Structure formats: structure tokens, C-alpha cells
Image: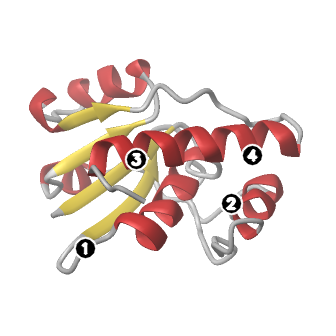
Amino acid sequence: MKILFVCTGNTCRSPMAEGIFLSKYKKDGDECLSAGLYTKDDSPASPNAIQAMEETGIDISAHRSKTVTADDINNSDLIIAMTESHAEMLKLLGADAEKITVLNVCDPFGGDLDEYRKCRDEIDKRLKEIFNTGD
């Protein structure tokens, strides 16, 4: 399965989601990518996102932001949007509504480390629900 994680700037939520998925929920044959709707390409993950993830043993320090493309959308089996507004924009860009799942996770951008920890934990909780793991 090819999974696409989408947020606004691809420096906080979607890279954290990608890191969590790769670390905990990926199965053989799965591929994933994160991207943003309003992104400055090649920006690093935010320092607080990196630190919040490091606390769980997941390293996203090599992440670089990327703008979502039509190919990303068309080649994905599952698109995980962080909010309903992201999902709506993805539909306008041609994404099949059937392929979109929404996490409803607030943007921690500009917040303190605790906001990023809360965001990380909420993403993890929602991914666990989606990928039906028992751990």
C-alpha cells in the first residue's frame, strides 16, 4: 500500500506521521511519503517536531519538505490528511474522496514542545486506530 500524509507546510504533522508510521505500523510492501499543500520545498522539519520525535526514538532530522503533486495524489492508495480543510483541498486537486482519511490533528506550529508532544501522541493514537494494531 502506498500512503501519503498531508498537512500544510510539511514541517510538523505530516513528517511526524510519516516517522511514526515507518517506525510502528509499516508492513512489508508498504510505502509512504509526506507532503504539504502550502510548502516551501526542502525545508527541514521544525526543531520541536524533531525533538518530540527523538523522545520516542524516531529520527526525522533528515526530513525535507515537499509540495504535494498530482502524481503523489494519483499514485497513493491511502491519503491521510491532518484536517478536514486539507481533505477538501486534496479533493479540489483531484483526490478521490474514498482514498482520504482525516486525522483531525491541530497544528502545533509556533507552539512549545508540549504542543508538539500532544500532537505527536494524537497522531500516534489515530494511526493505531487506522492500522488496527494491538500494541
- Looking at marks 4 and 3 on the same chain, the residue that comes earlier in the sequence is marked by 4
The structure residue drawn at horizontal position 66% and vertical position 61%, both measured from the top left corner, is 43
In this view, 25 is above or below 120? below
Amino acid residing under circle 3:
Leu
Numbered badge on residue 27: 1
Question: How many marks are shown on the rendered structure?
Answer: 4
Numbered badge on residue 45: 2
Mark 3 residue element = helix
In three-dimensional space, the C-alpha distance between marks 2 and 1, rounded to whole angstroms, equals 25 Å
- Relative placement, left or right, of 54 versus 19 is right
- Looking at marks 2 and 1 on the same chain, the residue that comes earlier in the sequence is marked by 1
Across and down, in percent, residue 51 comes to 80, 62
Numbered badge on residue 127: 3
Circle 1 crowding by C-alpha within 10 Å: few under 14, some 14–19, many from 20 = few
In three-dimensional space, the C-alpha distance between marks 4 and 2, rounded to whole angstroms, equals 14 Å
Amino acid residing under circle 2:
Ala
Provide the residue designation for mark 4.
Answer: 117
